[in-house]
Amino acid sequence: MNDVLDVGLRLLIVFAVFLVLPLVVGQTEHKVMAHMQGRLGPMYAGGFHGWAQLVADGVKFVQKEDIVPANADRRVFQLAPAVALLPYLLVLLVIPIGPGEGAVGQVIDAGLFFALAVMGVGVLGSLMAGWASANKFSLLGGLRTAAQLLAYELPMLLAAASVAMAAGTVSLPGIVEAFEWWWLPWQVVGGLVFFTAGLAELQRPPFDMPVADSEIIFGAYTEYTGLRFALFLLAEYAGIVVLAALTTVLFLGGWHGPFGGDGSGWVWTLLKIAALSFVVIWLRVSYPRLREDQLQKLAWTVLIPLALAQIALTGIVKVAIQ
Amino acid sequence: MPPIPGSGLAKGLAVTLRTMTKRSHTAQYPEVQPELPPRSRGVIGLFEENCTVCMLCARECPDWCIYIDSHKETVPAAAPGGRERSRNVLDRFAIDFSLCMYCGICIEVCPFDALFWSPEFEYAETDIHELTHERDKLREWMWTVPAPPALDPAAEEPKEIAAARKAVEKAEVAAAAATAPAPPATGTYPAAPGPGTPTLAPAPAERAAESGPGTPAAPAPAAPDDAAPAGESTTPLPPTTPEGDA
């Protein structure tokens, strides 16, 4: 009985985090983008500093009609947003926030493997959406998405593998346990590759070519309206949280902080996640969108060689230490 | 030295970060009214009293968006035995701002200063017909016309004032010369130039130059003010004064 309660509580907390953190990131994005671009639009809703902007967005999404195109594959069309969103919820289960059993939803020995495998499912959501929309442009968008996600999966895995090699484990808490401060310069290339590839996995600017709203009208999501579209957006923001959390755990030492005991570990983790989420937003504001060929070229000719070099470096240092 | 690869990317990030820490410069228009320059072209105001229904504005308007209706009234003779006079009375003066292209030609051609630019620009309507402003509305705009901006500190003096001032100075000199050495001749020199004196008008030589090549350059008659010997009253203008392009 106690086990059931324990599991239920953990699931509830992870679910709450899953619902809250992406919204916080979304609100931050509204405000940060507004400030960076000198815009006043998001500063009106609700009075002080436009605090209700996200609420207004939510109300807007709920009001919209839920349309399924006549020729669409109904079941697949309706399921696609859930398929895109769920992987991120599952990944959140295994990410350790602080040291010890209490600060992680579920300890899995192959946590890194699990996280990356589950995140790979996300591409299915976009493919389903593109295919089921019965719209050739959506299909094109879906295929572009798939091409991009597959291209960036590889450097992401390679960079993560380098850390796993360094720590000698694929358990996420294990990696953080093994973390030393000098891993920061040692794994910095891998970290950059991981973060960049993750950004592309999320189809965030500047890697949002497949959903380019001004060019191919949101790619695979053209036919989606109202809440289903909001779910795709939520998947994007949940993805930011997951990416920031994974980068924190793998490359930035998770709950290790320059000062403070183990008790305040979760604060460090959250701070690092917040900082990385800010960087994600910052990059979105600063850089223009990559073209299709530039996108693929970056993955195959820059990120993968860098990731391989990082693995080689990790191997050499590892052998040298022993 | 070649730029470090990736330095452009860093520069971009720096720009956005710097912008984030600054206050936005965006004009908060509906809450804060914009500060318009004094010659803003917002809407046209009509000063009815100055309008003589000469129709110049309506005729010069490239868009033909000015509508003027008028009729003639006869004014009874002022003195017994005098002649009756006729006078134009404005019935309608309307500007269709859906056609107006804000060129300002009407305002420039108006010889009697009856039309003015007002900086008011918030007169959007949901019906295009309501953009035709009748004379009462144009009259209301008139009260929003700002006072003309002051001249620049180093600006040239306006011609009318310069001419008047010169005339007064000369008159003073002449008066002083007349009172001191010799007894005044018949008549007294007017202290201020009266309507009969030509002092307000530019010197004839100047006018001849202004009249352009179309008019035969008349030999500049001796300017009466310059030539006026002390003690003499004003000499009348020679009858051959060039009158513009008459």
Image (cartoon, grey):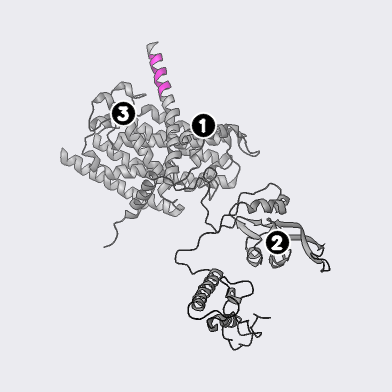
A17, B193: nearer the viewer: B193
Q: Is residue A96 left or right of residue B167?
A: left
Q: Label 1, label 3: how many angstroms apart (C-alpha)? A: 27 Å
Letter of the chain that mark 1 sits on in the rendering: A
Location of residue A279 by image quarter:
top left
Residue A55: give its label: 1
The outermost residue toward the top is A1
Percent x, y of residue A88: 43, 32
Q: Say what amino acid the circle numbered 1 marks.
A: Val
Mark 2 and mark 3 in contact? Answer it, CB < 8 Å.
no
Location of residue B108 by image quarter:
bottom right
Q: Are marks 1 and 2 on the same chain?
A: no
- Magenta stretch, main secondary structure, is helix
Q: Residues within 10 Å of mark 2 (few under 14, many from 20)?
A: some
Q: Is residue A187 left or right of residue B210?
A: left
Q: For the magenta stretch, what is the residue range?
A: A3-13
Percent x, y of residue A10: 39, 20
A193, B120: nearer the viewer: B120
Residue B51: give its label: 2
Location of residue A92 by image quarter:
top left
Q: Say what amino acid the circle numbered 3 marks.
A: Val
Percent x, y of residue A140: 54, 47
Letter of the chain that mark 3 sits on in the rendering: A
Residue A267: give its label: 3
Q: Are marks 2 and 3 on the same chain?
A: no
Q: Label 2, label 3: how many angstroms apart (C-alpha)? A: 78 Å
Q: Is residue A198 visible?
A: no
As drawn, A297 above or below A119 = below
User: Who's the residue at 42% across and 41% down the image?
Assistant: A32
Q: Is residue B89 left or right of residue A41?
A: right
Percent x, y of residue A8: 42, 18
The outermost residue toward the front is B183
